[in-house]
Amino acid sequence: MNTFDILEQLARYEVGTSRRLHLIASENPLDSDTRVPYMLPGTMARYAFGEPGQHNWAWPGRETIIDLEAETAAALGALLGTQHVNLRPISGLSAMTIALSALAEHAGDKATVLSLAESDGGHGSTRFVAQRFGLDWQRLPVEPATGAIDLDALARQARATGLLVLYLDAFMARFPFDLTGIRAAVGDSALIHYDGSHPLGLIAGDQFQNPLADGADSLGGSVHKTWPGPVGKGIVATNDPALAARFDTHAAGWVSHHHPADLAALALSTAWMQQHARDYAAAVIANAAHLATELAVGGLPVCADERGATASHQIWVDIAPICPAAVAAQRLYDAGIVVNAIDIPGLSEPGLRLGVQELTRWGLDRDATTVLAAVLAKLLAQGVSASAVAAEVQALREQLTSPEDRQGTDELAGFLRASDRQEVGVA
């Protein structure tokens, strides 16, 4: 390995990924302003320990970052309707580990953790983490037809089990949970944690649901899906002072240092959300609903039930009747469109999961959504070639990419040409 080869490899990847339309439900790249902390040596590489107004143990002169953390937590809490936000988690999984650790202690050693099975749309790590803590993990009951929590079965399970922690962790998140019904089913003694990794930005925009107002005891998750923040950051939050104290204790135990650049990037994304959260969240949901409708019109089998196709950023497509999901994803990739081919609740074969949050931030509107749906239908339902839709994809890319990002990509492409190496992976 040498420096030039590494830089060339990174440039090739960046050019390739920048020239595609990304419909990944779990991604939301930073805008140019929010990337700035990662270019600042002090912010990127220095430790910052301590609490606002207290001595910064062993690392003096870091008060600015410590104060910024407190300001960010307060601003983020105002958007989410919570008085206490801990910003120490360094990922969504880190937030999950901290939450389960603290909730288990709060509920008692003999608590049972209920969460969604992976086949029902739950996160693959929840059961693993709970069981590694020695907790009794049980599957939340769901209604087969809709994937919603079966409240009658949950009430029976709660009566038979005793101390409960419910970890609501849908990463296949098309619809809000019925938190009022869930609380009624399990009673006031149960602890309900809402993992909002996917809908967090929609919650902040008051367009999805308000977990803490609707019956959850705590809220957590990552901040890089519908919330447009850094990958290396998560949160845990609550309005319960005793639970907040446990979160703080367990967060300090599980994470020694939580990276000032990630914190600063979260601060910048929070400032953006203070200005745009409501309009952005409403646009995401409107674009997702319109895309689902247009895909169905175009002959693609969109997953839906009596609640509709989606109330969030996600659309699921049962692509197996047309072709295997992996084949469909490759066709789209070859045309410059990136999607997930994954297992989907209720389907016997993998399907496609689409998310519109990233493109919405870059300007996706109703007209562009109609064009996007037509391109997807041509590639999948009609089987046309990537070259046949190249002009439409290129026009969408130009519309949904900022001028400065296009300039940066052009500069990288120039670097690749100057290196006299072939560009690969670029549609």
Image (cartoon, helix red, strand yellow):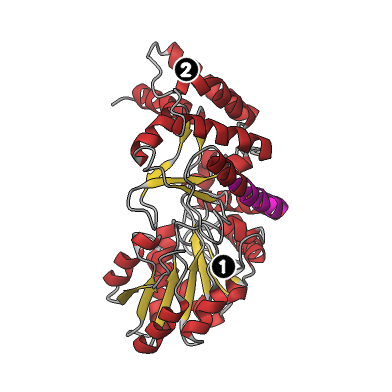
Q: Position of residue 35 (x, y in %)?
A: 56, 41
Q: Which quadrant holds residue 398?
A: top right
Rendered view: 222 above or below 391: below
Q: Please report whichever mark, 1 or 2, sits nearer to the chain's N-terminal start.
A: 1
Q: Position of residue 367 (x, y in %)?
A: 67, 35
Residue nearest the observer in this picture, 237 or 378:
378
> What residue is drawn where x is 52% and y is 57%?
174
Rendered view: 329 above or below 72: above
Q: Amino acid at mark 1?
A: Val
Tell how many labels. 2
Locate residue 249 relative to residue 391 in the image: left or right.
left
Residue nearest the observer in this picture, 9 or 361:
361
Find disc 1 in the rendering and name its residue.
85
Dot 2: within a 10 Å radius of its alpha carbon, few (fewer than 14), some, or many (20 or more) residues? some
> What residue is drawn where x is 35% and y is 61%?
118
Whether 286 is among the magenta residues is yes
Q: Main secondary structure of the magenta part?
A: helix
Locate residue 172 relative to residue 311 in the image: left or right.
left
Cβ atoms under marks 1 and 2 closer than 8 Å? no
Identify the element where label 1 is drawn: strand
Find disc 2 in the rendering and name its residue.
415
Q: Amino acid at mark 2?
A: Phe
> What residue is drawn where x is 62% and y is 71%?
82
Dot 1: within a 10 Å radius of its alpha carbon, few (fewer than 14), some, or many (20 or more) residues? many
Magenta residues span 275-288
Q: Position of residue 157 (x, y in %)?
A: 38, 83
Q: Is residue 170 visible?
A: yes
Rendered view: 261 above or below 339: below
